[in-house]
Amino acid sequence: MLIFNTTYLVSDKVHGIWLKWVREQHIPFMLESTYFTQPQVARVITSAEQDGTSFSVQFHVLDMHTLKLWNKEYSQLFQEKCSQQFGTEVIFFTTVLEVVE
């Protein structure tokens, strides 16, 4: 099992709009692809000074093969949707975490 994590730095100007977008558009978009389960949104706690607030949005994904399929089919569309909606007010990067039991 893997966790697909996207960390966002969200400017204070769009904080509320971004959270609404995540809940109403982004999470449903990711779940409708059928590649992901168990969405989770968390605020990143940091002592570093930054403009805005950092958030982590995570989904469980079965394996790397499944994630590569999603990347091939949906990654570009995901990036375009976020950029069109928020421009430079939201920046993000993704990481993949392996669940160790």
Image (tube, rainbow, N blue to C red):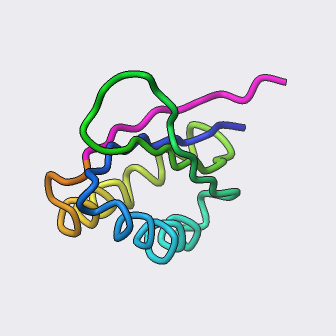
Q: Relative to residue 66, is residue 20 depicted above or below?
A: below
- Is 36 in front, or is 63? 36
- Is 46 in front, or is 24? 46
From the viewer's perspective, is 29 left or right of 9?
Answer: right
Instruction: From the image, give the main secondary structure of the stretch colored magenta.
Output: strand
From the viewer's perspective, is 62 left or right of 78?
Answer: right
Pinpoint residue 81: horizontal percent, then vertical percent. Answer: 27, 67
Residue projecting furthest to the left: 88
From the viewer's perspective, is 50 left or right of 16?
Answer: left
- Is 74 in front, or is 24? 24
Q: Relative to residue 1, is residue 75 depicted above or below?
A: below
Residue projecting furthest to the bottom: 24
Which quarter of the image is occupied by the C terminus?
top right
The magenta-colored residue range is 91-101
Instruction: Give the residue drawn at x 26%, y 51%.
Output: 11
Q: Relative to residue 61, is residue 15 depicted above or below?
A: below
Q: Quadrant of residue 39?
A: bottom right
Instruction: Give the residue drawn at x 52%, y 49%.
Output: 57
